Image: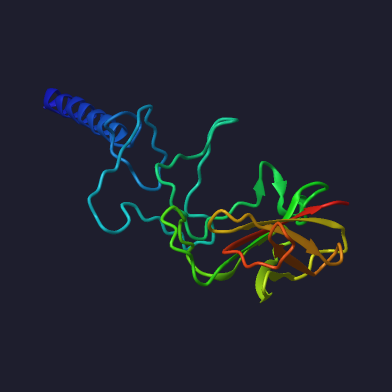
Amino acid sequence: MRTDLLKGVVLGALTAALVLTAATAMAGTGVGGVFNLGQKNTANKQSTLRAATSGKALQLVNTGGGPALGLNVGAGKAPFTVNSGATVQNLSADTLDGIDSNGFARQGGLGGIAVVARWYAPQLPADPTFVQPDRYGGEGGWATNGGSPVMTKEGTGWYRMKVDPALSGQAYLLFANADAWGSTPLYAQGSGPFSGPVWDIYVHDKNGNAADAYYVEVVLVRMN
């Protein structure tokens, strides 16, 4: 009977050892191991989850007040990579190259372009080489202060540009370009206070006669 008892003890010990060994292998401690929730899992090779679904392939939810995902990498390494250039909603960045938004100038620097505005004629000539714009009239443009420049036609050869909100009290140099269809060249010049907010642009032919252009572009360059 003692022999049978000893055999039973040995068999039980071997079985327990095998169970513990199997449990260790199942605890995610190596390649091919099972991923166990609530435990530390280790693998030194890439793990891949591949799905064919119209929804999310993986959803992480944490109702305990903490983050749903943590990504830790070595110094100087990117925490993740993407293969799409699409914008991710609600994903924001606090800095650009380590600089906060308050560190970027909202007004063009000395000698920099502060405003670009354009105006197109409501009726275009029959010019097959001209690319039609998306819309006519005061097409606007952009301003470094975040404002919206608007150009209007006030009379024959007379155009007006206004920036809203107005630029700060600086001096600006105005450059105007007027294009005419055909062989007749047109010229443009601007007048008004250096600081705006309204500038008048006059277009004329080589004899100084007021003339309408089918395209007028105005550029303001900051002088101080």
Judge by depth and name the residue closer to the eye, 110 or 46: 110
Q: Position of residue 145 (x, y in %)?
A: 74, 61
The residue located at (39%, 37%) in the rendering is 41
* Quarter occupied by the N terminus: top left
Judge by depth and name the residue closer to the eye, 212 or 183: 183
105 relative position to 94: left or right:
right
217 relative position to 25: left or right:
right
The residue located at (28%, 29%) in the rendering is 21
74 relative position to 161: left or right:
left
Outermost residue to the top: 3
- In the rendered view, tell whether residue 176 sits above or below residue 84: below
Q: Position of residue 12 (x, y in %)?
A: 20, 31
Q: Position of residue 153 (x, y in %)?
A: 65, 74
The answer to which image quadrant residue 204 occupies is bottom right
Q: Position of residue 71 (x, y in %)?
A: 50, 42
Judge by depth and name the residue closer to the eye, 46 or 102: 102
The answer to which image quadrant residue 14 occupies is top left
- In the rendered view, tell whether residue 110 sits above or below residue 121: above
The answer to which image quadrant residue 17 occupies is top left
The residue located at (42%, 39%) in the rendering is 40
Counting every numbered tag in the picture gives: 0
Judge by depth and name the residue closer to the eye, 87 or 132: 132
